[in-house]
Image: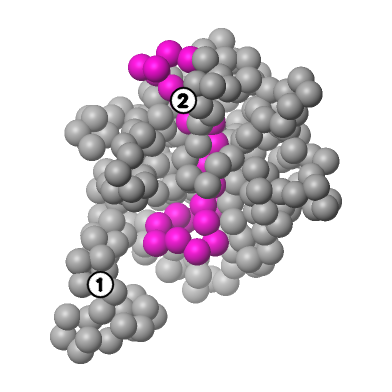
Amino acid sequence: MNDIDLAVPLMDGPSYDRACSLVPSEYVEAWEWFLGEEQRGGVWTSLPHHTKEDSPQYQYRLRIGSDFFPVTRDSGIFWPGQDRVKQDPNKIFALSVHNSKKSFYTDVPPLYLDDGTWVIKYSVQAPGAVGSRDQNYNRKMLNCMECGVPVGVIFATEVGYKVLGLAFVERFEPENGWFVLHGPVHKGGPDPRFAPDMSYLKHMPVDIEFAGQGTTDDEKVRYALRRERLGQQWFRKQLVAAYDGRCAVSDCGVSEALE
């Protein structure tokens, strides 16, 4: 994780058009798919790579040529293997991210800002979470951040998987163990709404979407408090794991009580 500790924020002036010159053509076709699904607005009952022929979403899976092309895999941070896409092994970019309906990761639901963009805090890949293989998942996200390459974002809700579109990896927060994703990214040149300065998170009014339902004032307050308490989410995950999900004093194992 040392390379993450030294990570820098998103470059100045990132844009979709510039990013197209940095990635293989398959990435650009996958980005087109994310843009199309963002506009279509449908909700997937399963992730695209798990969608079967009897599903109404099957027709919307991405094809490149005559073959289906994966935009997701079971791992939350995904990029296509070298058997599908040839790219520099020293600079592989993440293609997409998704969260899980049931996960120990603390991904934060979208915050919708007044300027028409949204922000998601997406958990880094925890050490040892993928067994004995070390595929440098986080390094692929850092490559996107450092070069201004967007990633596709799919967020799980109670009713299914929502394709939010493309986002820049705008910042890494080591104190929380989060990547900050900012979207939606659309075709064109630099958009002044995407910049390394993250102060807007403290000063701009936000709305939060929970599974497509309205958000109460109490929920917004709780989110704001979570946002300000730097480091506590990452610390909490480590603490829960260390004590096997139980209180060290009472031996209580009820997650709501531990929270």
From this viewpoint, which residue is outermost toward the bottom? 250
User: What residue is pinned by disc 2?
Assistant: 93
CA separation in Å, label 1 and label 2 = 34 Å
Q: Is residue 150 above or below residue 125?
A: above
Q: Are marks 1 and 2 in contact (CB under 8 Å)?
A: no
Q: Quadrant of the C terminus?
A: bottom left
- Amino acid type at circle 1 is Asp
Q: Find residue 36 and report its horizontal and vertical position in percent.
A: 75, 34
Q: Find residue 124 and report its horizontal and vertical position in percent.
A: 36, 45
**Residue bounds of the magenta highlight:** 87-116
Q: Quadrant of the N terminus?
A: top left
User: What residue is pinned by disc 1?
Assistant: 244
Question: Does dot 2 land on a helix, a strand or a loop?
Answer: loop
Q: Is residue 175 above or below residue 157?
A: above
Question: Does dot 1 land on a helix, a strand or a loop?
Answer: loop
Asked whether residue 203 is in view, the answer is no
Q: Residue at the spot x=43%, y=22% of the render?
A: 92
